[in-house]
Image (cartoon, rainbow, N blue to C red):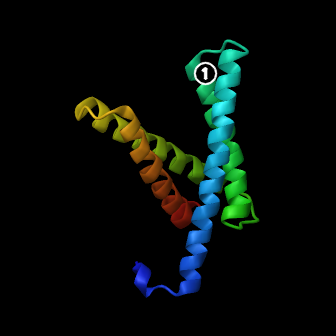
Amino acid sequence: MRTWSEREPKEVFGIVSQFTKYALVGIIGTGIQTSILIMFVEVYNFQVIVATTMGFICSLLVSFFINFRWTFGRNKLTIYSFVKYLIVSLSGLLLNISILYIMVDLLGIWYIWAHILTLVVVPISNFTLNRMWTF
């Protein structure tokens, strides 16, 4: 794998552009999940775990399709791509939970600091895996 200094400026710009799009899609996905969570808990009295799972699934579907077309510019939709995206998303969830567990439960760090770290680490990890493997 080449280092950043070995890449052409056009290639670096393309990666940064893709990551920016990926981050924007992530913000949209977070908004969808949070909205569904709040709506189904507050309006329909669903259990939190059920509501957040519904939000995760909706967010995953919307994020996949937007990333597929807009972020990574793909046209041919396959179930194979979706399964890979799902695997990456679930690995990101596992990474998120692992970071939170280690920092909060084992090290006694305030959960907000741990969450901030996950907001940096998980999107970079997911973007890299999706860019190199899924799309």
Which corner quadrant holds the N terminus? bottom left
Residue 88: give x, y in percent of width and height: 52, 50
Residue drawn at 64 percent across, 61 percent down: 21
- Residue 118 as seen in the image, left or right of residue 57: left
Residue 82 in view in this figure: no
Residue displayed at 69% across by 44% down: 61
Q: For the residue marked with disc 1, what is the amino acid?
A: Val
**Closer to us: 80 or 71:** 71
Image coordinates for residue 27, horizontal then vertical, percent = 63, 47
Q: Is residue 8 above or below residue 92?
A: below
User: Taking 31 as reference, is 105 left or right?
Assistant: left
Residue 55 position in % (x across, y down): 65, 32
At 25% from the left and 31% from the top, the residue drawn is 108
Which quadrant: the C terminus?
bottom right
Tell which residue pokes out farthest to the right in this image: 75
Question: Mark 1 sits on what residue?
Answer: 50
Classed neighbour count for the residue bearing mark 1: other residues with Cα under 10 Å, few (<14), some (14–19), many (≥20): few
Q: Position of residue 62 (x, y in %)?
A: 71, 46
**Quadrant of the image occupied by residue 72:** bottom right
What secondary structure is found at the residue carrying circle 1? helix
